[in-house]
Amino acid sequence: MLNPFRVISPTTVPEAAAELDRLGDAALIYAGGAELLLLMRHGLLEPDYLVNIKQVPSLHGIHWDGRVLRIGAAVTHRELERAPLVREHAPTLGEAEGHVGNIRVRNQGTLGGNLCFADPHADPGTPLHVHDATVTVEGTRGPRQLPLDDFFVSTYETALDPSELLTEVQVPQLPAGWGWSFERIERFYRPTVNAAAAVAASDGHIAEARLAVGCVGPRALRLRELEDRIKGLRLADAQREVADAGAYLVERLEPVSDLLGAADYKIHVTSVLLARAVEHALARTGDGR
Ligand SMILES: Cc1cc2nc3c(=O)[nH]c(=O)nc-3n(C[C@H](O)[C@H](O)[C@H](O)COP(=O)(O)OP(=O)(O)OC[C@H]3O[C@@H](n4cnc5c(N)ncnc54)[C@H](O)[C@@H]3O)c2cc1C
């Protein structure tokens, strides 16, 4: 049984922000409800009001502005999985979206809800990191834009102020000629570990690299030190570097043992998935000799 609550359905972002500001702790944002309704059903959250943001048209678009893919916070995983614009300009994200949960979760859950819930066992944050994504959040004092890296704070914790909502995710396209990959292993429909790579190649060597990993510790992270270490290497040497990076991965990712895997197992799987991601990304550059 759910405790009684009222649903408020604003039709603009400023209206939604004003309701959140007015109602304070008594209200929660409701998007797809995939997480929220579960928590309410278990009595872990008992809001008096749900501010339903699904009636806000500006939160539903996927637009390409010539440089950046702009995704409204209320776009569902399924829409992202199927959108030609996502496949064309942010294929790493499109690939990850196709792996989220199951078809019911993908139809129900939104990108905004996924990022704002900040469950460490989530997929979209990892590919968004290799695209250097930013997000826009908006409250009664207006919008502010921040890098995804600053938006994620820790497990179930983001940089959102209580009366702010996430409105848009901006995903720059990878530079021309770069290859990409998203790798994942899962249990109980949730990712145990995921990894994303984007690389540029020159004469069979890795010229540029972006690497990100999720689900291992409190939040998804870029691995900039490892990116630097594999630059200039051929695939086999880069993979050896990744395999030897255990100490760095532990320090950077702060692995947590949980129902989906022990900390040392997750670090081992991280190395395997990163090596695979680099290989597949390099192959997509067409210069993976
Ligand atoms: C069985 C199952 C399997 C799953 N498997 C995966 C998986 O494999 N990979 C994966 O990544 N995820 C997985 N998930 C998580 C799923 O992706 C998220 O539950 C979903 O995306 C959340 O979006 P939502 O719109 O339903 O959010 P809601 O449940 O509506 O909201 C979640 C939280 O975010 C807040 N919120 C929502 N939108 C906003 C916004 N725009 N601004 C500010 N706050 C907001 C809400 O107040 C609430 O606190 C799984 C979930 C389930 C139930």
Image (cartoon, grey):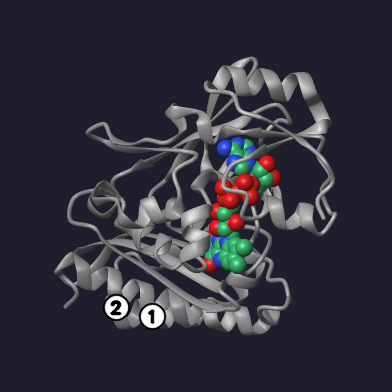
Question: Which residue is depicted at the point 29% across and 45% down?
Answer: 173
**Contact? badges 2 and 1 (CB < 8 Å):** yes
Label disc, if present, on residue 190 of the rendered structure:
none
Q: Is residue 215 left or right of residue 286?
A: right
- Residue 177 position, x and y percent, is 17, 56
Q: Quadrant of residue 274?
A: bottom left
**Closer to the camera, 258 or 199?**
258
Whole-percent x and y of residue 77?
44, 54
| Quadrant in the rendering for residue 72 | top left
* Numbered-mark total: 2
Left or right of 261, for residue 214: left
Residue at x-position 37% and y-position 52%: 80
Residue placed at 39% from the left, 64% from the top? 98
For mark 2, give the secondary structure. helix
Between residues 67 and 187, which one lies in front from this camera angle? 187
Q: State the separation of the CA atoms marked 2 and 1.
A: 6 Å
Residue 278, position as x, y percentages in the image: 34, 72
> Under tag 1, what secondary structure?
helix
Residue 152, can we see it?
Answer: no
Type of residue at label 2? Leu
Q: Is ligand 1 less than 8 Å from the beta carbon at label 1? A: no
Numbered badge on residue 239: 1
Image quarter (top left, top right, bottom left or bottom right) of the N terminus = bottom right
Image vertical order of residue 25 relative to residue 149, above or below:
above
- Identity of the amino acid at label 1? Gln
Is residue 104 visible in the rendered image? The answer is: yes
Q: Return the mark for residue 235.
A: 2
